[in-house]
Amino acid sequence: MPIGVPSGLPSAEMTGLAREVMSRAYAPYSRFRVGAVLRGANGKLYAGCNVENSAYPQGTCAEVAAIAVMVADGERRIVEALVMGEGDVLIAPCGGCRQHLREFAADRGADPSVRPPPACGAR
């Protein structure tokens, strides 16, 4: 399934993993924790969280962290992505993360939109 064509809600496994890694985020400056989970074309899930640094913008976004884990495992294609932040407000990847997601999208012509979690938040 291409990144740009959501076919429904993400799996409970993806949602749970995103919530788990979001809780591990290092965000002492913004206090805005983010978790991202990607499904590779191989079916495996890859998770990442944001890691801030006082030398802004040297931190790492959750989406980029998850992509790095995926690439380190030898996978090069994303077929599904979920990004979760705390609270009730829907969040979307920044422009840089959208470009990273597009780079590894299974369907590179697709809009790199990302599905919201079922409740659009982690509460």
Image (tube, rainbow, N blue to C red):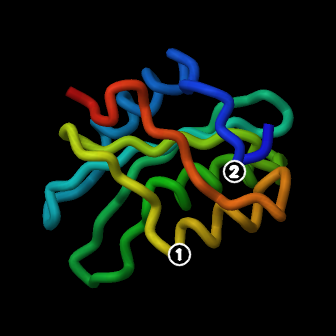
- Image quarter where the N terminus lies is top right
Whole-percent x and y of residue 115?
Answer: 53, 40
Residue at (20, 27) in percent of width and height: 123
Sequence-earlier tag: 2 or 1: 2
The front one of 91 and 30 is 91
As drawn, 58 above or below 15: below
What type is the residue that disc 2 sits on? Gly
Foreground mark, 2 or 1, reads 2
Number of residues whose C-alpha sits closer than 10 Å to that of mark 1, classed few (under 14), some (14–19) or many (20 or more) = few
Whole-percent x and y of residue 80?
Answer: 68, 39
SS category of the residue bearing label 2: loop
Whole-percent x and y of residue 53?
Answer: 28, 72
Whole-percent x and y of residue 68?
Answer: 64, 57
As drawn, 93 above or below 55: above
Residue at (44, 69) in percent of width and height: 94
Q: Is residue 1 left or right of residue 62?
A: right
The total number of labels drawn is: 2
The front one of 119 and 29 is 119
Q: Which residue is mark 2?
A: 4
Number of residues whose C-alpha sits closer than 10 Å to that of mark 2, classed few (under 14), some (14–19) or many (20 or more) = many
Q: Are marks 2 and 1 in contact (CB under 8 Å)?
A: no
Q: Which residue is mark 1?
A: 96
The front one of 19 and 27 is 19
Among the 4 quarters of the image, the one containing residue 60 = bottom left
Residue at (34, 82) in percent of width and height: 57
| Distance between mark 2 and mark 1 Cα atoms | 17 Å
The front one of 55 and 2 is 2
What type is the residue that disc 1 sits on? Gly
Q: Is residue 96 left or right of residue 6?
A: left
